[in-house]
Each structure stands twice: as structure tokens, then as C-alpha cells.
Amino acid sequence: MNCILHIGTTKTGTTALQNFFYANQSQLSDQSVFLSDILGKPNNRLFTLYFQRFKKDRWAATNNITNPKEKQAFFKDFEERLSDDIKQASIKHDTFIITSEGLSLRIKNSDEIAEIKNFLMQRFDQITIVGYFREQSDRAISGHSQKMKGRGLKISLEKFLDKEATMQDYTYNYKAIADDWAAAFGKENCKFRIYDREYFPEKDIRLDFLNILGIPIDRSKLDFSITQKNQRLSRLQTAAFIKINTLVPYSHDPKSKTGSLNKKLKNAVLSLHSLNFGTNITSKQTEVYRRFIELNTNFFKDYFDGEIGFKEPKKTTTEEKVFSLTEVEGLVSDIFEALLPLMAGTGDLKKPGMRRQSKD
């Protein structure tokens, strides 16, 4: 049986693939493609966490894991159960898919990659590494939204691009990521792609990935209606999230009252249609793109024969809109109706955005 190991590298693309695969799990299984529930559905996060050195992070805090020994206890029998799953799958299936963004975000040294290789080599006939690489400034803008939502980030997009989207950050150094995985598994076993819909069949990453599998797949039996939910924050949502994360701090601790309130407030903001306005863009996107030109040139030379590269971001201008007093009045009403019950602890969210009509 062959293994397709998708190392992520782009949150949006990985989420789209994961949702698609597990929504079609039984149909794919009928066509000789296997996805394991043991890895963690749908993000296969447990596979990454098992091989990653212990780290005090959000996952560890959520699972009350404070040291390597407790992590080892959490993953008791994980390797044995996964090995049994692979063995059983090999009886009727040709391809075993593992897809986890964490493989490029959390696995950052050769020793961890070597352990993954040793584990897979003992259980599969062929291993193919798949990675989709997204132009760094575009990825950083998406990452800003995700860290606003799930990690309590409280800085503007401009400051985030200056601080995080640098060559010193491994997750943006695509040459280093590709080199590390190619060194372990062999360059000939790596299929690297640009994350750009223009390069995908019918502009769909799912079709591109199905082509990589190299086996006949009856697309008519698969459900392509599942859409990815990893949407960027709007300008107004971002402004709200910065204040929420600043004044009601996010916490990894699931027992934290402020952490719980932080999540509820942000969910309330996301449910407000009136705040879903304005594209989060910045002139710094071009600056970030140029920051990586030399590194990316070497990356594409080594893994794409230098034939293609990332497209320079289009120059955009900040959207401006003049709101009428009536629109502002409705916006203020929506916000207070959504947030005050949560702040006062008087109950659940009451469908914000749907203002009650005055009886007067």
C-alpha cells in the first residue's frame, strides 16, 4: 500500500482537502483510498503531535498535559493502534492518505522528520510527500486572521507582517521546508505545488490532489459541495477582534472565564452580518513579497526547474465607504444586542444582526 503524506503549508488549502476527504470517506474507501480516524478527524493533528517533541502550547493546555511523561500517557498505544489500522487497510486499499497542516508548522527539525520516515517506511511500499506553497504575503494575511480567531492575537495586520512574515520564521521559508522533507524522503518522492487556483484543474485544489493520487477515481461518486470555512476576517471584524483580545484576554486554559468569554464574544462578532465589511488589505503585501524574492527564486529553481514562480500581489487601495446615520444606528444596535447579554452573563446569543422592530 502507498502513503500520500500531505504536509500542509497552507491552512486554507489543507482545510478544504481535509473537509472534502472526510466528507467522502466511505466513497473514497470504496475506490481503494483509506483515511484513518485514529489520526484525528479531519485535521490528522494527532499524527503530527505524536512525532513532535513535547511543547507547552494550546493543545497541551487543553488536554491538561504539562510534561513529556503526560504526553506519553496520552498517546499510549497510539502507534500500535495506527499500525493495526494501516495493516487492516492494506488488505482492500491501495492508498493511505495523511494530511496535516501541523507537519509544516510543528515539525521543524530533521530528527522529527526522520522518525516519521522510519515509521512510514516500515509500513508502506511507497511514500509520496505533497506540499502546496502559498505566496508568503498572502499566507501571512490569512494567518493574521487565524491567529486573531484562535490565539488571541491583538496587533494590526501591518505590524503582524513586519513581525512574523520574515525569512527567520521557518513556516515562511519554503526552501528550508522543501529541503528538509526532500532530504529525508528523496526529492523524487516529493510533489510540490503552488497554491494558486489558476494552476489547478477547474481551479479546484481537490481535483489537483486527486490527480496526484495516481489511481482511477470516479468523481461522480464524490460530493464536491463541501466548502471550506477558513474565511479571512473583514476590516471591521478585525478591529473588533483586536479590542476583544486586548480587553478580554484569550487563554489556552479551558477553565479560564476570560478565555471562554473571549471565544463567545468573537463568535458573536462573526455572526453579525453588518460587521462583515471591508477587505483586510495593506500596501505592505508587496513589501513582504519582495522580501522573499531571492529565497523563492532558489526554491523554484530547485523544485520547479525555475519555470514558474509566485505572482506579485496586485496593487490595491483601501476600500472606503460612507455610512449613513441610519446604517451606523443599526450597526451600534446590532453590536450591543449581541455582546451585552454575554458580558452580563444573562444568556446565550440571540441571533445578532436581526434587530427587533420598535413597536412605536
Image: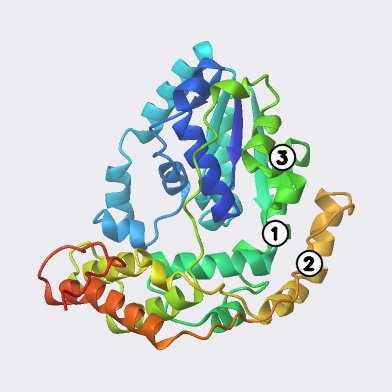
Q: Name the disc covering residue 74, or none.
A: none
Q: From the viewer's perspective, is 205 left or right of 99?
A: right
Q: Regarding mark 3 in the picture, which secondary structure is present there?
A: helix
Q: Regarding mark 1 in the picture, which secondary structure is present there?
A: helix
Contact, mark 1 vs mark 3 (Cβ under 8 Å): no
Q: Regarding mark 2 in the picture, which secondary structure is present there?
A: helix
For mark 1, does the 10 Å Cα neighbourhood hold few (<14), some (14 to 19), or many (20 or more) residues?
many
| Distance (Cα) linking label 1 and label 3 | 26 Å
Contact, mark 3 vs mark 2 (Cβ under 8 Å): no
- Residue type, mark 2 in image: Leu
Earlier residue among tags 1 and 3: 1
- Image height of 71 relative to 154, above or below: above
Earlier residue among tags 2 and 1: 1
Earlier residue among tags 3 and 2: 3
Quadrant of image for the C terminus: bottom left
For mark 3, does the 10 Å Cα neighbourhood hold few (<14), some (14 to 19), or many (20 or more) residues?
few
Residue 289 lies in quadrant: bottom right
Task: Find residue 84 and report its horizontal and vertical position in percent.
Answer: 41, 22
The mark lying in front, picked from 1 and 3, is 3
Residue closest to the far top: 91
For mark 2, does the 10 Å Cα neighbourhood hold few (<14), some (14 to 19), or many (20 or more) residues?
some
- Image height of 57 relative to 217, above or below: below
Q: Nearer the viewer, residue 33 or 226?
A: 226
**Residue assigned mark 2:** 295
- Residue occupying the point 49% across, 55% down: 230
- Residue occupying the point 79% across, 58% down: 299
**Residue assigned mark 3:** 202
**Residue assigned mark 1:** 174
- Residue type, mark 3 in image: Glu
Contact, mark 2 vs mark 1 (Cβ under 8 Å): yes
